[in-house]
Amino acid sequence: MSSLDSPTRPDDETNGRHSARSSERERLSARSFPSHGDVIGAGYKIIGELGHGAMGVVLLGFDLKLQRKVAIKLVDTSHRGPDVRERFIQEARAMALVNHPNVLRIHSFGEHLSVPYFVMEFVDGQTAEDWLEHCHGAPDLDRALRILDEVCQGVSAIHAAGAVHRDLKPSNVLLDHALHARVADMGLAAPYRDGGIIKEIAGTPAYMAPEVAFEGEQAPSPASDVYALGCMAFELLTGKLPFDADTALALMVEHATAQAPAPSSVRPDLPSTFDDVLLNALTKNPEDRTASAELFRRGLLAARAASAEPSRILIAEDDADFRDLLALKLGMEFKNAEIVCVDNGRAAVAAFAEKQTSVVMLDLDLPLLDGVGVTAELRTRPDAENAAIVVLTASGGPNEWKLLSSLGADRFLVKPVNLDDVIDTVRAVVRERAKHALGA
């Protein structure tokens, strides 16, 4: 739910919301919101629109002093009473309390023709919800985990500032072109210490903790955000939400009473090491739930490190007998991995481009393009960032390894090699790359 909209209520109906928003947009368009070319506040020129909700707009602006793009959020409070204005101010204050690279930054607050607005960081990219839709199936595991890792860090910073977000979901996470995350849309955020949050049903039913789904139970707390993080993680790792229902009320009942399925049962190729981590975050009783966003983040890291297994191994070796022996041994050890064999460096680069690869095993003296050339070429590719490269040689020495290491190779093995050592090396480099992918 965007903070341009009202808090979710269990009796909301989709068609009613859409028709209400359509009429609201017509009314808003007639108001004196800034137009393209207008300059408001301390020199913010309006250059476009980023979003439009039932209660206001988010505009794209240009800071004439600092020469940068900004996002400007305005809310219509003229017919909604003081509560809406106070909530808007509360959102701005909640953002101002947090200074963290994974939380959207606020720059200033003001009014334009009695319409309150605040200016915030502009993120040129997409939402995590958009990214998930573009995956067209099971999301890439390590990319999803990297997004979740940064979201958890942002949420931890919000909690450390004494606030809870109360509406965590993929559409409220902004991703830049490098997929770095910013937690955004803090329209429902509020201080949780000293009884700062009143009990109300506010948030999005698909991500709402049981203790806040029904009024009169328990006020939101950091544990409520951890539950929402568990729902987000379930969705980003499996492509599906833990619960589904036809109405908002039925969905909240599911969250309060039903047991979430094991994530690995929803996505069979997801390592089962993630099951307990996600299900602990989705525990009904907040006192039994994962204690913090930081502990949840560490749990995801540990699950990935414990489960790291290669999904595709590319062997580039011109000695047919040794190539076949390597393929046989690796196939026996990593039964779920696809083993691809080529006999020259150019074919290795082409095979890598066909599909995401976990490990590349290269002979140093390959025909057409040697191991140094293949390593250099692969490391220029964005899709090779998380691939491990192991170079095998019968003649190279310290100078070759120094060069290969500088180009991004992970290991250098001297022939003849013990095949058990090769297996141990593959496991080690896959785990290292998994941790690297998450910034651990």
Image: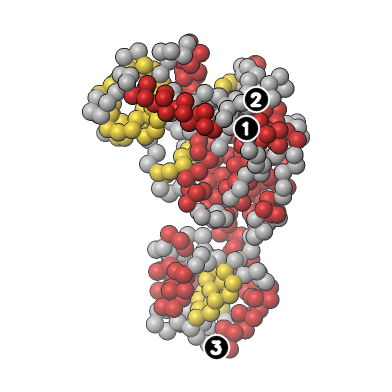
The reply, left or right, for residue 293 in relation to residue 108 is: right
The residue shown at (52%, 32%) is 15
The mark lying in front, picked from 3 and 2, is 2
Q: Which residue is mark 2?
A: 220
Q: CA distance from mark 1 to mark 2?
A: 19 Å
Considering the numbered disc 3 on the image, is that residue within a helix, a strand or a loop? helix
Residue 137 on image: x %, y %: 55, 55
Mark 1: few, some, or many residues within 10 Å (few <14, many ≥20)? many
First in sequence, mark 3 or 2: give its number.
Answer: 2
Amino acid at circle 2: Pro
Please tell me whether residue 379 is drawn above or below residue 147 in the rendered image: below
Please tell me whether residue 406 is drawn above or below residue 28 in the rendered image: below
Q: Which mark is residue 320?
A: 3
The residue shown at (69%, 40%) is 281
First in sequence, mark 3 or 1: give its number.
Answer: 1
Would you identify the image quadrant in which residue 434 lies?
A: bottom right
The reply, left or right, for residue 307 in relation to residue 435 is: right
Residue 351 visible: yes
- Mark 3 vs 1: CB contact within 8 A: no
Please tell me whether residue 81 is drawn above or below residue 387 in the rendered image: above
Q: 41 or 237: which is nearer to us?
A: 237
The mark lying in front, picked from 1 and 2, is 1
Residue 371 on image: x %, y %: 45, 76
The reply, left or right, for residue 26 in relation to residue 428 is: left
Q: CA distance from mark 3 to mark 2?
A: 63 Å
Q: 56 or 163: which is nearer to us?
A: 56
Amino acid at circle 3: Ala
First in sequence, mark 1 or 2: give its number.
Answer: 2
Considering the numbered disc 1 on the image, is that residue within a helix, a strand or a loop? helix
Residue 109 visible: no
